[in-house]
Image (spheres, rainbow, N blue to C red):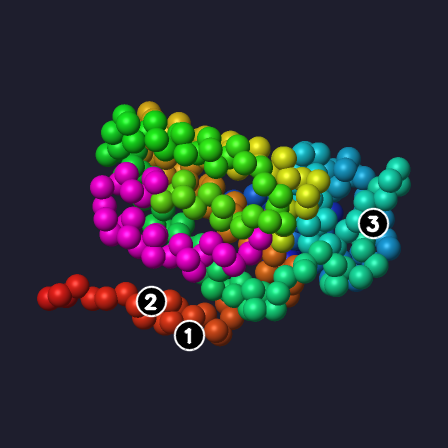
């Protein structure tokens, strides 16, 4: 892929500048850019099995990013089974990176292209859903949305036991408060298809559980706070960021498992998915 080829050439100030230009164009988080670059180096053999990664400070200097960004990127690679920590020594490339970290049923892996497409669909619908909710919600509904968010975010369940989209009820509540039955009905229709596909443990290592839940809570809170302020533009942007982050995590899963996000099975899957939708009388 062109992005990875460009990223792999980082090393000079000129190279870092080019990467930043691409980042702005594609709006990818810096941690994703760094993780993608390191992943490509592992797969190309530039970082061989057993090789030690540079220190956080060295990687930060190489990619011109903060240590926090580097830690997030390394967390992605650890979740993918591409690298492993060794106590007191550092981070090393796994001896068998393509066989570790993804105990996912084959039938679930096969749905990755559709899952990505469905998340893109959700992104297009739910951004506006958040904006309309901010404009139309009642005070009682705003309180109910916050209460539901707090309940969902307080669970902190084992990533191996909970679904990636464990917060779907929260999203549906926002859709319900748009006063648009089509938005709510459509997202409710998608629920049984989206929710059960993957467990959170497929993208989040157990040691990063608390940090992950804290990040999701912060994203949720930004959405709810904007809704409470009746700030529709801020609600849209907060929802966009939240769902974009989710989409990037699933794309990283697809990358690590070698699944093509634009798989040819997607048209067939979409036909099956929407076969049950009925055209309104007179439509």
Tell which tag, 3 or 1, sits nearer the viewer.
Answer: 1
175 displayed left or right of 82: left
Where, quadrant-wise, is the C terminus in this rendering?
Answer: bottom left
Query: Measured from the top left, where is residue 47 in percent x and y?
Result: 80, 56
**Considering only order in the chain, which callout, 1 or 2, is on the residue closer to the N terminus?**
1
Where, quadrant-wise, is the N terminus in this rendering?
Answer: bottom right
Task: Say which residue appears at 79% left-offset and 49% top-offset.
Answer: 84
Task: Say which residue appears at 58% left-offset and 53% top-offset.
Answer: 199
Kindly indicate the quadrant of the structure image that contains residue 100: bottom right
Q: Which residues lie in the magenta part?
A: 173-200
Tell which tag, 3 or 2, sits nearer the viewer.
Answer: 2
**Considering only order in the chain, which callout, 1 or 3, is on the residue closer to the N terminus?**
3
Mark 2, residue position: 274
Mark 1, residue position: 268
Viewer can see residue 198: yes
3 in relation to 270, above or below? above
Query: Measured from the top left, where is residue 136 in percent x and y?
Result: 24, 34
Point out the residue furthest to the right here: 89
Element under disc 2: helix
Task: Say which residue appears at 49% left-offset and 74% top-offset.
Answer: 264
Mark 3, residue position: 92
What is the C-alpha distance between the residues marked 3 and 2?
45 Å
């Amino acid at each position: 892929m062109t992005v990875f080829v460009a990223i792999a050439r980082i090393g000079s100030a000129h190279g870092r500048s080019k990467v930043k230009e691409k980042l702005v164009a594609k709006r990818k988080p810096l941690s994703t850019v760094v993780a993608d670059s390191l992943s490509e180096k592992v797969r190309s053999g530039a970082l061989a099995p057993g090789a030690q990664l540079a220190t956080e400070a060295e990687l930060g200097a190489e990619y011109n990013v903060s240590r926090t960004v580097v830690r997030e990127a390394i967390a992605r690679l650890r979740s993918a089974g591409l690298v492993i920590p060794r106590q007191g020594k550092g981070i090393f490339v796994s001896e068998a990176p393509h066989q570790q970290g993804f105990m996912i049923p084959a039938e679930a892996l096969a749905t990755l292209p559709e899952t990505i497409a469905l998340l893109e669909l959700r992104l297009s619908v739910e951004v506006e859903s958040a904006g309309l909710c901010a404009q139309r919600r009642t005070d009682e509904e705003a309180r109910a949305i916050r209460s539901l968010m707090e309940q969902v975010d307080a669970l902190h369940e084992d990533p191996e036991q909970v679904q990636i989209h464990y917060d779907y009820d929260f999203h549906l509540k926002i859709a319900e408060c748009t006063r648009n039955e089509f938005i709510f009905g459509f997202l409710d229709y998608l629920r049984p298809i989206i929710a059960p596909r993957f467990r959170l443990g497929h993208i989040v290592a157990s040691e990063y559980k608390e940090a992950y839940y804290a990040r999701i809570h912060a994203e949720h809170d930004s959405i709810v706070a904007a809704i409470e302020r009746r700030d529709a533009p801020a609600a849209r942007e907060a929802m966009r960021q939240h769902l974009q982050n989710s989409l990037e995590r699933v794309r990283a899963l697809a990358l690590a498992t070698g699944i093509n996000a634009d798989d040819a099975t997607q048209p067939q899957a979409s036909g099956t998915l929407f076969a049950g939708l009925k055209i309104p009388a007179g439509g």
